[in-house]
Amino acid sequence: MKKITQWYRSIRNIIVNPRRFFSKIVADGDIEESMLKAFIYGLLGGLLVLGLHLLNHASVTISSVFTAIIIVPVVAVAMLFVGGGLLMLVSEITGGERDWEIAIKGLASIFFIYPVILVMNALAFNCISLWIISIIGDVYILFLFYNIALYCMRGRRGAVITVVGIFALFLLTVYLSDYHLGWLWIKNASAAISCYHV
């Protein structure tokens, strides 16, 4: 219960004052909690999406249950480490911290957004709604990534803005090209189908 309360306070602080929250992250040798956060948030996201399918009277198979309780949480942990590597690269470019643990802790703290994005994507019912949800989610993730790179990894502001700007430009290119169909398909295949007729 204490751990849940701490996680709730962390989420509130990230939303209300990300600069203050990320500035306080330090390496203390406890990376297991970060992995646990990613796994729990992944599990929560998988179960919520499964629950939405049940509410929509979709057929639930062994495969969908396995995906919800095993695949999605494991993918979340994998994303944590891939993101950590990317953040270390960004930190190297921007002259920030070169500490793997701080990178992982910073990223793990924002994994509360993972189940939110999974559910929001699952709620999309057509191409337009999926576009809107996808863009809002991607922009907010970029905003959080900017805060981690600047305040947690202590990169140079100008360099961080430049790198995040490049990521934003890349995303814009994806959305303005045919690649957006694949990007949207990953998020919600049934809603993305309608994009082929737009």
Image (cartoon, rainbow, N blue to C red):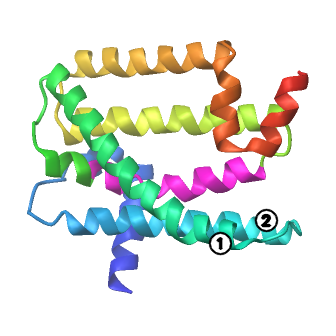
Residue 18 location in percent, x, y?
Answer: 35, 46
In the picture, measured across the screen, residue 31 lies left or right of residue 12, that is left
Q: Residue type at mark 1?
A: Val
Question: From what the image shows, is residue 162 above or below residue 190?
Answer: above
In the picture, measured across the screen, residue 61 lies left or right of residue 154, that is right
Residue 65 location in percent, x, y?
Answer: 65, 72
Q: Residues within 10 Å of mark 1 (few under 14, many from 20)?
A: some
Quadrant of the frame with the N terminus: bottom left
Q: Residues within 10 Å of mark 2 (few under 14, many from 20)?
A: some
Q: Magenta segment, principal secondary structure?
A: helix
Residue 4 location in percent, x, y?
Answer: 40, 77
The circle drawn on residue 25 is: none
Towards the viewer: 79 or 19: 79
- Label 2: which residue? 53
Which quadrant holds residue 7?
A: bottom left
- The residue lying at 37 percent from left, 22 percent from top is 164
- The residue lying at 78 percent from left, 36 percent from top is 192
For marks 2 and 1, the one nearer the N-term is: 2
Which residues are drawn in magenta?
106-123
Q: Residue type at mark 2?
A: His
Quadrant of the frame with the C terminus: top right
Question: From what the image shows, is residue 177 above or below residue 153?
Answer: above
Question: From what the image shows, is residue 38 above or below residue 100?
Answer: below
Towards the viewer: 53 or 101: 53
Instruction: Report if residue 10 lies within the magenta region.
Output: no
Badge 2 element: helix
Towards the viewer: 165 or 10: 165
In the picture, measured across the screen, residue 138 lies left or right of residue 31, that is right
- Label 1: which residue? 65
